[in-house]
Image (tube, rainbow, N blue to C red):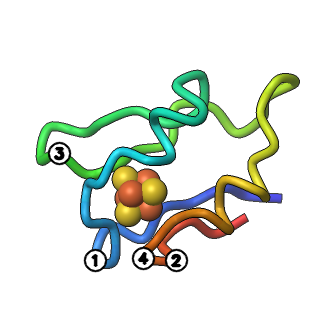
Amino acid sequence: MVLTIDQALCSGCGVCIELCPEVFGQGADGRAIVKKQESETCNIEEISDQCPMEAIDV
Ligand code: SF4
């Protein structure tokens, strides 16, 4: 599994960062970035489903 965020799609809404700050961070341009590929506490697939722009690929 490789977790990626499509920067062309991400609106910078912050939902993923709020749900799992361990894995998702905010880049200099306000869009989300991947900080870690894995987490024991967050369900990354569920967060991916909640991205309004469908920008998170798992
Ligand atoms: S939830 Fe989606 S659109 Fe919102 S910041 Fe995260 S990747 Fe970007």
Ligand 1 neighbours mark 4 (CB distance < 8 Å): yes
**Tag 3's secondary structure?**
loop
Dividing the image into four equal quarters, which quarter contains ligand 1?
bottom left
Q: Nearer the viewer, mark 2 or mark 1?
A: 2
Tell me the distance, in whole angstroms, between the alpha carbons under discs 2 and 1: 11 Å
Tell me the distance, in whole angstroms, between the alpha carbons under discs 2 and 3: 17 Å
Tally the numbered discs: 4
**Tag 1's secondary structure?**
loop
Judging by the rendered image, the residue that carries numbered circle 4 is 53
Residue 38: x and y in percent read 78, 35
Q: Earlier in the sequence, mark 4 or mark 3?
A: 3
Residue at point 65% right, 62% down?
48
* Marks 4 and 2 in Cβ contact (< 8 Å): yes
Residue 20: x and y in percent read 60, 31
* Marks 4 and 3 in Cβ contact (< 8 Å): no
Residue 58: x and y in percent read 73, 64
Which amino acid type corresponds to the residue marked 3 in the rendered image?
Answer: Gly
Judging by the rendered image, the residue that carries numbered circle 3 is 30
Q: Nearer the viewer, mark 4 or mark 3?
A: 4
Q: Earlier in the sequence, mark 2 or mark 3?
A: 3
Tell me the distance, in whole angstroms, between the alpha carbons under discs 3 and 1: 12 Å
Judging by the rendered image, the residue that carries numbered circle 2 is 54
Which amino acid type corresponds to the residue marked 2 in the rendered image?
Answer: Glu
**Tag 4's secondary structure?**
loop
